[in-house]
Image: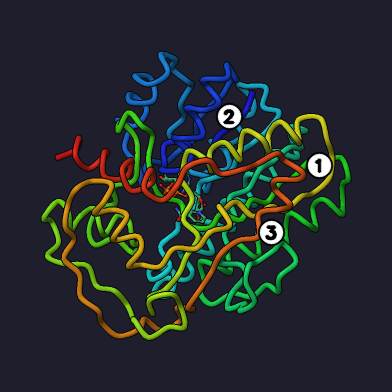
C-alpha cells in the first residue's frame, strides 16, 4: 500500500487520481489545514474508487503510528507541508515545526515499521539564486527563505538516512512551477485570500475577485522584461510521481530529479496564453520588482527523461485552459 501524505492538497490529489486509475492501493493522510474534505468526494467522482482517508497531523506521532499499525504500507509519497514563502519569512518556526518535525515523525515511524520507500516533494527553490540556466540536478544549492530551508534540510536528512541504511529507496523531486488542473475541473488549486503565485492570481482577476494583476518588474534581461519561469501541468507532475514509484518499488538508492518542462515563459507570455486559451482579457499593471526574484528559472529535464522516462506533454495554453476550468465551475 502507498501512503500519500497531503493527498487532498493540490498536487497530492492529482497524484492520488493517477494512482487509483492504475489500480494502486492507496491511503491518504491529510490534516485538512490547506484542503477540504470535498476533495475526497471529487476524487471518488473522478475515479469511482474510495481510498481510505485519515484526518491525521504529521505532528501527531501516535496517530501516524496507528496508520502504520493498521495498514501494510510499503511506500510513502510525502506531499504534506506548508508552502507559502512569505508566511515562512514571518513565521519560520511554524514552518520548521510542521515541515521538518512532521517529516522526522514520518521517517521515525516508517523506520519502525520497516517501510523504506519514500518520494519527497522538494522544490526548485533549493537552487536559491543560481544564475546559470537551465538548472540541472548538480546546480549549486542555496536557500533564500525559511520555506526553502525546510526543503533543503529534508533533502539532506534523507541523504543522511540513506547513508545510514542503504536498504532505502528514496526519490527527491524538485518541482518547478505547477499549474493547471484535472480536465474534469473537479480538483485543482483555488487558494483562499490573495494568492502568492501567478496562475491562481490570474484566475482571481479573471473572475473579478481581484481588480488587476501586478506584474513585478518589466526590466529584467528576458524576452519582454518580465520574469521567466518553467510552468508544468500538474497532470504531468503527477505522472512524474507514478514513474518515480515504479522506479523505487524495486530499487534501492537515492535519486534526485527536476520535474519541469525545460521551457520558460515570461509573465506576459503567460497572460497572453491565458487570454488566448480562454478568450478573456486580464487587467494587469507593471509594478516594481519584488525583492528576491530572479529574472529566469527553468529546468534541465534530461535526467528525469533518461532515468524515469519522464516527459511533460502539456503546453502552456493547456495549462491556462485547465486552470481556468476549475474556477469557471467553481463560480
Ligand atoms: N505548489 C507548488 O508550487 C509547489 C512547488 C514546489 C514544491 N511544492 C511542495 O509540494 C507539496 C505539495 O504542494 P501543494 O501545492 O499540493 O500544496 P497543498 O497545500 O495544496 O497540499 C499540501 C497538503 O498537506 C496538508 N498538510 C500540511 N501540513 C500537514 C501536516 N502537518 N499533517 C498533515 N497534513 C498536512 C495540507 O492540508 C494540504 O492538503 C508541498 O510539500 C509543497 O511544499 C509545491
**Residue 270, relative to residue 128: is it above or below?**
above
Seen at 65% across and 60% down, the residue is 300
Instruction: Tell me the number on the disc at residue 168.
Output: 1
Q: Cα distance, mark 3 to mark 2?
A: 26 Å
Is the C-beta separation of discs 1 and 2 under 8 Å?
Answer: no
The mark nearer the N terminus, 3 or 2, is 2
Q: Cα distance, mark 1 to mark 2?
A: 22 Å
The mark nearer the N terminus, 1 or 2, is 2
Q: Is residue 220 left or right of residue 216?
A: right
Q: Viewer-nearest of labels 3 and 2?
A: 3
x, y percentage for residue 33? 37, 47
The residue labelled by disc 3 is 155
Label 1 CA crowd tier, 10 Å (few <14, some 14–19, many 20+): many
Q: Secondary structure at mark 1?
A: loop
Name the quadrant of the N terminus.
top right
x, y percentage for residue 330? 19, 38
The mark nearer the N terminus, 1 or 3, is 3
Seen at 52% across and 21% down, the residue is 20
Label 2 CA crowd tier, 10 Å (few <14, some 14–19, many 20+): few
Instruction: Tell me the number on the disc at residue 66.
Output: 2
Q: Cα distance, mark 1 to mark 3?
A: 14 Å
Instruction: Looking at the picture, tell me which residue is in the foreground, 133 or 191.
Output: 133
x, y percentage for residue 222? 45, 77
Q: Is residue 108 left or right of residue 270?
A: right
Seen at 51% across and 73% down, the residue is 296
Instruction: Tell me the number on the disc at residue 187.
Output: none
Instruction: Looking at the picture, tell me which residue is in the foreground, 174 or 88.
Output: 174
Amino acid at each position: 500500500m502507498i501512503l500519500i501524505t497531503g493527498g487532498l492538497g493540490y498536487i497530492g490529489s492529482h497524484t492520488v487520481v493517477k494512482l487509483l486509475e492504475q489500480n494502486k492501493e492507496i491511503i491518504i493522510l491529510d490534516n485538512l489545514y490547506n484542503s477540504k474534505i470535498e476533495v475526497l468526494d471529487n476524487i471518488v467522482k473522478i475515479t469511482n474508487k474510495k481510498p481510505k482517508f485519515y484526518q491525521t497531523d504529521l505532528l501527531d506521532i501516535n496517530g501516524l503510528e496507528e496508520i502504520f499499525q493498521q495498514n501494510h504500507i510499503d511506500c510513502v509519497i510525502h506531499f504534506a507541508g506548508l508552502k507559502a514563502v512569505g508566511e515562512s519569512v514571518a513565521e519560520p518556526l511554524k514552518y520548521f515545526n510542521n515541515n521538518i518535525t512532521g517529516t522526522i515523525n514520518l521517517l521515525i515511524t516508517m523506520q519502525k515499521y520497516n517501510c523504506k520507500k519514500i518520494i519527497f516533494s522538494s522544490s526548485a527553490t533549493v537552487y536559491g539564486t543560481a544564475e546559470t540556466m537551465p538548472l540541472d540536478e548538480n546546480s549549486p544549492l542555496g536557500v533564500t527563505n525559511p520555506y526553502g530551508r525546510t526543503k533543503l534540510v529534508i533533502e539532506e536528512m534523507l541523504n543522511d538516512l540513506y547513508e545510514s541504511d542503504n536498504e532505502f529507496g528514496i526519490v527527491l523531486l524538485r518541482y518547478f512551477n505547477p499549474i493547471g488542473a484535472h480536465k474534469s475541473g473537479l480538483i485543482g488549486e483555488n487558494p483562499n485570500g490573495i494568492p502568492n503565485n501567478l496562475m491562481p492570481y490570474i484566475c482571481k482577476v479573471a473572475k473579478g475577485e481581484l481588480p488587476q494583476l501586478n506584474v513585478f518588474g518589466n526590466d529584467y534581461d528576458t524576452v519582454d522584461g518580465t520574469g521567466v519561469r518553467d510552468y508544468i501541468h500538474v497532470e504531468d507532475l503527477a505522472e512524474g510521481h507514478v514513474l518515480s514509484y515504479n522506479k523505487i518499488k524495486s530499487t534501492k538508492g537515492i535519486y534526485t530529479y527536476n520535474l519541469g518542462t525545460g521551457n520558460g515563459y515570461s509573465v506576459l507570455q503567460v497572460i497572453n496564453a491565458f487570454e488566448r486559451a480562454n478568450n478573456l482579457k486580464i487587467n494587469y499593471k507593471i509594478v516594481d520588482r519584488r525583492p528576491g526574484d530572479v529574472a529566469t528559472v527553468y529546468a534541465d529535464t534530461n535526467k528525469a527523461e533518461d532515468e524515469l522516462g519522464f516527459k511533460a506533454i502539456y503546453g502552456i495554453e493547456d495549462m491556462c485552459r485547465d486552470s481556468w476550468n476549475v474556477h469557471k465551475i467553481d463560480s
